[in-house]
Amino acid sequence: MENKFIIAVYVDNQFGVLTRVTGLFTRRGFNIDALTVGETECPEYSRITISLSGDGYAKEQLINQLRKLFNVKKVEVLEEEEAIKRELALVKIKNNKETRGDVLSAVEVYRAKVIDYNLDEMCVEITGDPLKIDAFIKLMIPYGIIEMCRTGIVALERGTTTLLQKNT
């Protein structure tokens, strides 16, 4: 059975590390749904957050292979109920007087923000849980999405636990 899961990976913040990590996924035939990477609280390290689908056996194999990579310091699967997940999307939507009120009402309900506006289109920034963003996008389709860009998921564990505190 295929499940979605999120893997957090602490790596050395060096040239080529991301290529090695993503190459592992390619060689194993995994399709990455979303990938984000950025410097951590310690500039020597980056945190890669990877969202993908697979069965339990494939997930364990992948984690074991990631742990063998030289520049990888820590690998953990973030459990759905123990993770805080957020994403950012920019959505450019057609703007006309017939639908403007409905679109602006949806922007308010979803706690999004209009960040660019002209007579023909508006660009909306929305952040939050990926399911919230999916719902907003689905709602905007009939109004005419011109262009869209999503960042991918970033995630942290709830509470006082940190990735580096956990035992592997």
Image (cartoon, rainbow, N blue to C red):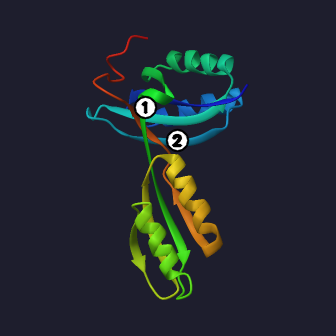
User: In the rendered view, would you say 137 is above or below 72?
Assistant: below
User: In the rendered view, would you say 99 is above or below 3?
Assistant: below
Residue at the spot of label 2: 35
Q: 48 or 22, which lies in front? A: 48
Residue at the spot of label 1: 83
Residue plotted at (69% across, 23% down): 55
**Secondary structure under badge 2?**
strand
Question: Label 1 is placed on what type of residue?
Answer: Ala
Residue 50 seen = yes
User: In the rendered view, would you say 103 is above or below 120?
Assistant: above
Relative horizontal placement of residue 119, taking residue 65 as reference (left or right): left
**Secondary structure under badge 1?**
strand
Image coordinates for residue 122, horizontal then vertical, percent: 47, 77
Image coordinates for residue 13, horizontal then vertical, percent: 37, 34
In front of the other: label 2 or label 1? 1
Q: How far is the residue under mark 2 from the one under mark 1?
A: 16 Å
Which quadrant of the view contains residue 99? bottom right
Disc 2 to disc 1: CB gap under 8 Å: no
Question: Label 2 is placed on what type of residue?
Answer: Leu
Badge 2: residue crowd in 10 Å (few <14, some 14–19, many ≥20): some
Residue 14 seen = no
